[in-house]
Image: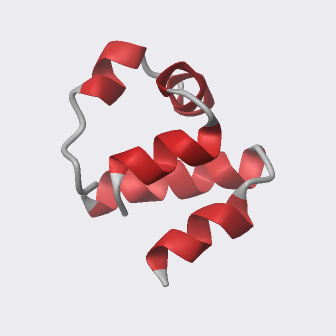
């Protein structure tokens, strides 16, 4: 799962940061390829934000 794809799906760095309750600065520091622990947080946020289908396409 790529950080750029996640940001595109959620709309902005700020939006993904809000969705997983971290600062935008923390998202900026993410590696380009997200490790499993961050992928898990993104998937959980996608469930809450009704974006799960879009995120699951990234893991296929």
Image coordinates for residue 13, horizontal then vertical, percent: 47, 26
Residue for point 60% across, 25% down: 15
Q: Is residue 28 left or right of residue 20?
A: left
Side (left or right) of 31 relative to 48: left
Q: Residue furthest bottom?
A: 60
In the rendered image, residue 42, in percent from the top left (x then y), is placed at: 51, 50
Q: Nearer the viewer, residue 48 or 12?
A: 12
x and y, in percent, of residue 45 in the image: 62, 45
Q: How many marks?
A: 0
Q: From the viewer's side, name the closer residue of 26 and 37.
A: 26
Quarter of the N terminus within the rendering = bottom left
Determine whether, in the image, residue 60 is placed left or right of residue 18.
left
Q: Quadrant of residue 26?
A: top left
Q: Position of residue 37 (x, y in %)?
A: 32, 55
Residue sitting at x 49%, y 48%:
6
* Coloring basis for residues: secondary structure
Query: Which residue extends farthest right?
Result: 50
Q: Which residue occupies 31% across, 15% down?
A: 25
Whether residue 16 is situated above or below residue 60 in the rendered picture = above
Which residue is depicted at the point 55% across and 28% down? 12
Location of residue 28 (image quadrant): top left
Between 24 and 11, the one nearer to me in the picture: 11
């Amino acid at each position: 799962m790529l950080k750029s794809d996640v940001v595109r799906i959620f709309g902005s760095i700020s939006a993904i940061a809000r969705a997983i309750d971290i600062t935008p600065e923390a998202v900026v520091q993410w590696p380009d390829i997200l490790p499993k622990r961050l992928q898990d947080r993104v998937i959980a946020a996608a469930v809450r934000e009704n974006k799960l289908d879009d995120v699951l396409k990234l893991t296929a």
